[in-house]
Amino acid sequence: MAYAPKPGCPMCSIVSSASHATPNSPRSPSFPAGSTQPEVLWRDDNFTAYREKAHPLSSKGHIVVAFNLHVPSIYTLSSSDLPLLVNIRNLANRLLSSLLPPNSPTTTPSGPSTPNPYHSSSPLQGHENLFRIGFITPPFKDNKIPVTDHLHAHAYITPADLMGWWRGIAYGPLAWYSIDDLIAEIRESVSNNRIKSGYENRTQAPIDMVPHAGARAGTADGIETSEPSIANTDAELEDGETNTARLLSPRSSSLLTPQSHIPTLRV
């Protein structure tokens, strides 16, 4: 099996410990006071999300979203895995929002916004400026969570009041890869369009309304060059789309006929 569990990997152990949980469902585990055992908050066929309690970056909340497969790094991902990255962002936003107190101050997005059925965090846009979601790129690592060969995203609520200066290197500009920037750069690699990233109203970008935008690649003569996704194609996306996970592996999708070609236009 590709990306099989690795003996001794801390992330694989956490994923394995949550494997009995009901898929696609939140969990509300009960732990003794003062326990530093990872609190698994979500488990589905592709990800396991847990609350970091032993060494959190923020007193308000720090969540780690780990791939269930032992994927070594972000450089293993291809454009076909874009829906997975969008799913991580949506899931992290929703879980972080659940950690905020009801009376938490929010920022108000400028301008009118249209509800987005493909973006699970649309009702929570006011909180998003408080959140940081992304990856630490090798060879850098968080010395308190020193896992470098099992891909996982960090999501936390600012300010990072428990970070410290040494850990700050891993979460600073040298090593930190924002998930928004990663999604945008992958889309740019398979598109003729520049995908603006990092602006305040990121969730209002029209392209973000389509989680699998940019997931297919091809040549000018209609040959599809998309690589197979690492996603579990039997799973549904967390953000509520029905059966879109089947689009994660373009070569196995029944929507592509013939499988290796995009229809060629005749002039």
Image (cartoon, rainbow, N blue to C red):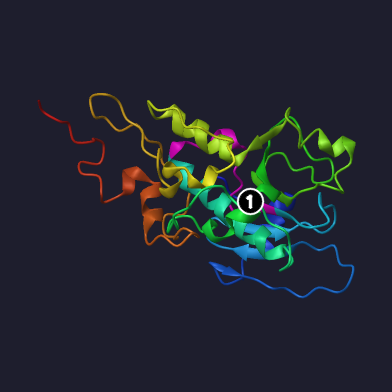
The answer to whether residue 208 is above or below residue 51 is above
Q: Name the secondary structure under disc 1.
A: helix
Asked if residue 155 lies left or right of residue 232, the reply is: right
Residue for point 70% across, 59% down: 50
Q: Is residue 151 visible?
A: yes
The residue under label 1 is: 128
Residue farthest to the left, as pictured: 267
Q: Is residue 7 visible?
A: no
Please state the horizontal and vertical placement of residue 169, each as a whole percent of the image: 81, 33
Please state the horizontal and vertical placement of residue 161, each as a whole percent of the image: 86, 48
Q: Is residue 78 rendered magenta in the image?
A: yes
Please state the horizontal and vertical placement of residue 61, each as a whole percent of the image: 76, 57
Task: Report which quarter residue 206 is drawn in.
Answer: top left
Amino acid of disc 1: Glu
The answer to whether residue 174 is above or below residue 65 is above
The residue range painted magenta reads 64-79
Residue for point 19% across, 36% down: 263
Q: Nearer the viewer, residue 110 or 242?
A: 110
The answer to whether residue 255 is above or below residue 39 is above
Q: Alpha-carbon neighbours of circle 1 within 10 Å: few (<14), some, or many (≥20)? A: many
The answer to whether residue 35 is above or below residue 163 is below
